[in-house]
């Protein structure tokens, strides 16, 4: 199996490890995270260094996956992606064997398809994206780079999602609408109109 570094050791990393182990294409060398997060292994995988150690670590293992989550902002994932691209390393697409991904779809480098996600024909997913458990990306959908499509979200045919967007758990996007760059759609939202770049759409209940 090909050796792989993971960048970020939090909750999303835990889920990513499960997918990587299940896919059985990569051997996790270890996890890179800030020293303030402690040095305990992450699900049995050692902490091998922090961002400052990346040049040396990537020389030895020139393949990495960003396992920092994206809820409030994609900024950390974008920074790490740019850093890895600057080092010229491989950013593989990781796909759960329980995900369905049409052979007519396109998935960008460094993206991960979690358990039971479904990517339909001619969908295009950008680089460094998270398509989380049970998310549906329908036919002809376009998703920009650095997006997180959360658990159980439904993106209907022909919708367009700009770069750096967050689509919350259980959200439903109407077919053909456009979501501007950096928009945030809260959990459970039903989106029937275009959303402006940077717009936050969430429920005020509770």
Image (spheres, helix red, strand yellow):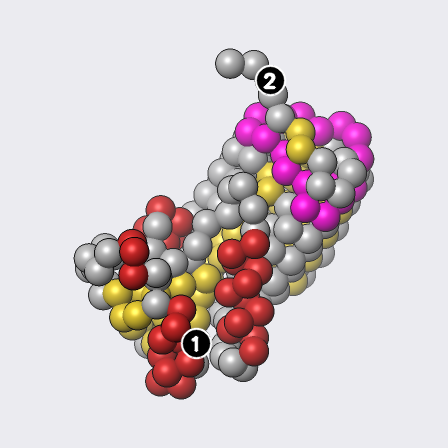
Q: Is residue 190 magenta?
A: yes
Left or right of 58? Residue 153 is: right
In space, the residues marked 1 and 2 are separated at their CA atoms by 42 Å
Element under label 1?
loop
Left or right of 198? Residue 134 is: left
Q: Is residue 183 magenta?
A: yes
Query: What residue span does the magenta drawing correspond to?
Result: 178-194
Q: Is residue 113 above or below residue 4?
A: above
Please provide percent x and percent y for residue 96.
43, 56
Element under label 2?
loop
Answer with the quarter of the image where residue 185 lies.
top right
Give the numbered dot on residue 45: none
Residue at label 1? 63
Residue at label 2? 204
* Towards the viewer: 34 or 180: 34
| Residue 117 visible in this rendered orientation of the protein | no
Q: Is residue 37 above or below residue 48?
A: above
| Residue 181 visible in this rendered orientation of the protein | yes
Q: Which residue is pictured at 35% across the width and 61% down the height?
A: 33
Q: Which residue is pictured at 64% across the width and 51% down the height?
A: 164
Observer-side mark, 1 or 2, equals 2
């Amino acid at each position: 199996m090909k050796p792989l570094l993971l960048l970020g050791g939090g909750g999303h990393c835990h889920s990513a490890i499960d997918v990587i182990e299940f896919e059985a294409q990569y051997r996790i060398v270890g996890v890179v995270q800030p020293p303030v997060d402690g040095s305990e292994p992450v699900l049995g995988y050692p902490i091998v260094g922090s961002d400052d150690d990346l040049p040396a670590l990537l020389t030895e293992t020139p393949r990495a996956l960003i396992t920092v989550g994206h809820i409030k902002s994609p900024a950390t994932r974008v920074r790490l992606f740019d850093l890895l691209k600057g080092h010229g390393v491989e950013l593989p697409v990781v796909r759960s064997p329980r995900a369905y991904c049409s052979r007519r779809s396109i998935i960008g480098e460094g993206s991960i398809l979690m358990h039971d996600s479904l990517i339909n024909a001619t969908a295009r997913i950008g680089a460094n994206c998270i398509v989380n458990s049970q998310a549906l990306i329908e036919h002809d959908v376009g998703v920009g780079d650095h997006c997180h499509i959360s658990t159980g979200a439904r993106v209907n045919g022909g919708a367009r999602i700009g770069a750096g967007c967050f689509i919350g758990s259980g959200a439903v996007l109407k077919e053909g609408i456009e979501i501007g760059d950096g928009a945030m759609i809260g959990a459970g939202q039903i989106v029937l109109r275009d959303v402006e770049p940077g717009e936050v759409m969430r429920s005020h209940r509770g």
